[in-house]
Structure formats: C-alpha cells, structure tokens
Amino acid sequence: ETPEFLAAFQARIDADEKIEPKDPMPAAYRKTLIRQIGQHAHSEIVGMLPEGNWITRAPTLRRKAALLAKVQDEGGHGLYLYSAAETLGISRDQMTEELLSGKAKYSSIFNYPTLTWADIGAIGWLVDGAAIMNQVPLCRCSYGPYARAMIRVCKEESFHQRQGYEIMLTLSRGSDEQKEMAQDALNRWWWPSLMMFGPSDGDSQHSDQSTRWKIKRFTNDALRQKFVDATVPQGEKLGLTFPDPDLKWNDDKGGYDFGEIDWDEFWRVVKGQGRMNVDRIAARRKAWEDGAWVREAAMAHVEKRKTQMAA
Ligand code: ACO
C-alpha cells in the first residue's frame, strides 16, 4: 500500500464518499470493519439469549408477543450484520468459529443474568437505549453496507427501547413489590449499560484510527455522556433512583456528572469471566451443533438443484 493509495483513500473518506465492497481499501480498514461488524453481529445473536430466557414466562400474551418479536428482530440484525461482514471477505462459518472459540468478542452486557421480569424492561430501556445512542451515528459510517444495515436496525431498536420503557413504567406505577423489582433491575443494569460504550477514550485503542476513517463518529466517552444525559430524566419520570451517589446535573457542562465505572469488572467480563460468559457460549455452541443438519440439508439441496440444472 503506497502512500499515494492511502492518501487517495483518505481523500474519499474526507469527501464523505461511501466505500463499497468492491472498492480498493487499505487492509487495516477492512480488518477493523470485520472486527467491529463481526463483534456487533455476535452481540445481536448472543443478545437473544438473556431475553429469550423470559419468553415462556412473560406475564401476558401481549408482552409475550412483543418480546418474541423483539428477540426475532435481534436474530435478523445479526444476519444483516453477518452479511455486511461477508462483503469484506470473511465467511459466516469463520466468524462463528471465532465466536465459539472465544477469539471474537461480543458486547459485555450480555454476560449478565436476567433474574426477574423487570430485567426485560431494564434491558429494553437501558441496553437498547445505549445501543441506539451508539448505532445512530453508525448510519453515517463510511462503509456503505454497514451504514445501510444500521438504518433499519435503529428503527427496530427504537421499538425495543419503547417496549422496555413501557414495562418499567407499568412496574413503577404498580404495587410496592413491582416498584422494588423495577428499582432492583435498574440497580443491576445501570453500570453494565454504561460499560457498553467501551473503555474510556484514553484506553480505547481503536478510536483515533476509526474516527479518521469515519467508522466512529463520536468517541466512547462522548456517547456515554449523551446516554446518561438522555436517560436520567427518563428514570426520574419513573420515580426510580440511579445507583450512583455522584450522579448530579452540572450546569457548566450542560450535562450530568457521574461516578467512576468499575473498569476491573468491565475487563473481567470482556475477558470471559463474567457471570454468564460460559453459559452464553455453551448455548451458542449447542445451537450451532443442533443446526448442523439444516446447513447440510441446505447444501444438499443446492447440489441437487445444480445436477438437475445441468441435466
Ligand atoms: N464489550 C466487549 N468488548 C468491548 C466493549 C464491550 N462493551 N467495548 C469495547 N470492547 C473491546 C473492543 O472490541 C476492543 O477489543 P478488540 O481490539 O479485541 O476488538 C477493545 O475492547 C478496545 O475498545 P475500543 O478500542 O474502544 O474498540 P472500538 O473502537 O471497536 O469501540 C465499540 C468499541 C464502541 C463497542 C465499537 O466497536 C462499536 O461501536 N461497535 C458497534 C456496536 C456494537 O457492537 N454494539 C453491540 C452491543 S448493542 C446490541 O447488540 C444490542
């Protein structure tokens, strides 16, 4: 890759041109996208597990239908994203192997357990709320297939966020016990949701380069701050208390100050030692193995069609 090639590529990025699959691109740009889109796809797929856990126990038929639709959407997002990554020259089988072997990461958030129905509310409100904050800017990312996939994904995520907030609203206006459930879910999901945005800017190894390539449009800390500012008033409307004594409005910066994230916990979870990491991967491995016959049957069908066409 000559300096001229790299400069010409950067000029296209600077001019806000979209990069498409067959366009020449630096190897490192391709690698970064495969890493990020792959991780994102895995997050959607693993993200089906904590909520799937509650489909059979949803309190009403309406809640069950909404939760089923949401979990199904997440499966769809995963498939879009795997397809977007495939345009960069990696296969879905390879990405799956990397997930199952522990080489590829997925979002830390999905390594926490869903203990009560209120967790489904908190996940929709907070986790999907954080996902939207992070993903709306990705609709303007420089890589065409990723940017376009994000448009539909974000629309569906807003429905997810609202269904979660509505669960929290219902619980927080309910009996004392329901209010307590909502508060307990907020207590357990608040900090892990803030961790979703990734390490602080000083520790974020990919941010500078990804920002120059317009893959990232905001830094991890900037998005985290936007999320806190948008979410705190929503929590106050619910009459709930955030589990952070340092959370307070700061007039000078026009945003909330908040306490320090437990980064040891973050890295432990990212490195595989969260409460649910082993279970999540075991569930994905089982799904992959149980689905082997479907993949084999699909391939056999393609082969048969080919022979029929040739005859
Ligand atoms: N969970 C797990 N790993 C993380 C997390 C997290 N919350 N945040 C950062 N990391 C990892 C990065 O993947 C990177 O590891 P790697 O080099 O082995 O790939 C490392 O920590 C350092 O972080 P950064 O340099 O800040 O990494 P990056 O620039 O990729 O930023 C971010 C991380 C913000 C998550 C980015 O990849 C992104 O925007 N991804 C797309 C959105 C996404 O994946 N969302 C998933 C959850 S939302 C959902 O599925 C509903």
Image: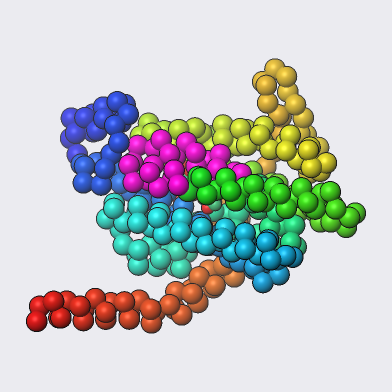
The residue nearer to you, when weighing 91 against 84, is 84
Residue 204 coordinates in the image, percent (x, y): 50, 39
Judged left or right of residue 289, residue 309 is left
Q: Residue furthest top?
A: 252
Q: Residue furthest left?
A: 311
Q: Is residue 66 above or below residue 263?
A: below
Question: Which quarter of the rendering shows the C terminus?
Answer: bottom left
User: Residue at horizontal 35%, vertical 63%?
Assistant: 92
Q: Residue furthest right?
A: 176
Query: Which SS type dominates the magenta stretch?
Result: helix
The answer to whether one can see residue 255 in this image is yes
Q: Is residue 205 above or below residue 298?
A: above
Question: Which quarter of the rendering shows the N terminus?
Answer: top left
User: Residue at horizontal 34%, vertical 46%?
Assistant: 145
Span highlighted in magenta in the image = 129-152
The residue nearer to you, when weighing 8 against 311, is 311
User: Residue at horizontal 89%, vertical 55%?
Assistant: 175
Judged left or right of residue 23, residue 152 is right
Residue 277 coordinates in the image, percent (x, y): 58, 64
Q: Is residue 200 above or below residue 30?
A: above
